[in-house]
Image (tube, rainbow, N blue to C red):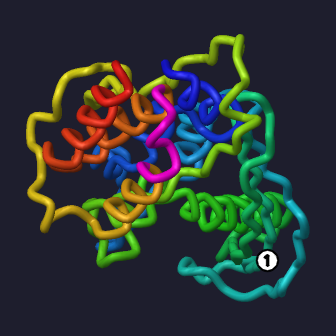
Amino acid sequence: MTADNEILARNYISPEQYEQLLKPVNESRVMFLGKTKHMESYDIRAHLNRVFGFGRWSAEVVSMDLIKEWTGKNSNNADAVYVGYRASVRLTVCAPDGTQLAVYTEHAAGDALGFPIAKVISAHDFAMKTAESQALKRAAINLGDQFGLSLYNAGSVEPLVLGTKLPVLGPDQEQQADLEELPELVPEDTGEYHDADSDAEPEDIKPLKDVDPAVNQAFEERLQQVQDNVNGLNALRKWAHNSGLPATQIDRIKVRLAELGQ
């Protein structure tokens, strides 16, 4: 791993995390509720652990309010209780070194309908857990397609994010060294993942006209920033490979490295 990538991996996200977050969601993780696609809250929690690691994220219940409780008859014409709650959940995710990356707060409602009167406590428990789970899922979609964002596009599993701008390293950060080894990203149980440390060329290199303009713009800006920095150029070359940029763009990095005697 180059110095630039090591620094990004320490206080932003690692190259493996970045690559994983840009992948489309694995269809095996998508469930159906009637005709609606969704993801289970337990799967969201498991994937937060896979991507960010144990102790590198938290979900705080900011508020839990009873909306309404009433009694009536259930489908068997027996006395039953109906309960509704509203929850607010704050999701925090951290970099491998513990640096706080982002905080997302979302709200959702959950209900328990037609519970027997004798199970009124269970009804409240069920409604509270449902509201919390729904709020967590809404917060997690801010992290992109791996957490169900694309499903809001008519249930599609095709990725929506496609690419982002990486943070810019300052001169002081680029001189840091001797960074501790970072834990490896734990993949899902199904599916294969590209090795971000591989120097192999991508199998399917897109023509420039088919590249997301935002990705290409990020490449141009970063190239200007690191054109005299060998480590920065090597990091950018690997990022360009993983982003599917065309060979003509990657060749520009090779030419500049040659000019610097590398």
For residue 193, say whether it is visible.
no
In the image, residue 243 above or below residue 132: above
- For image coordinates 57% across by 23% down, the residue present is 3
Tag count: 1
Q: Position of residue 132 (x, y in %)?
A: 74, 62
Check residue 89 for magenta coloring.
no
In the image, residue 246 above or below residue 54: below
Q: Secondary structure at mark 1?
A: strand
Examine the image and state in which quarter residue 76 appears. bottom right
- For image coordinates 29% across by 20% down, the residue present is 198
Examine the image and state in which quarter residue 84 appears. bottom right
- For image coordinates 70% across by 39% down, the residue present is 171
250 or 139, nearer to the observer: 250
120 or 23, nearer to the observer: 23
Q: Position of residue 17 (x, y in %)?
A: 50, 36
Task: State which region is magenta.
Answer: 223-230
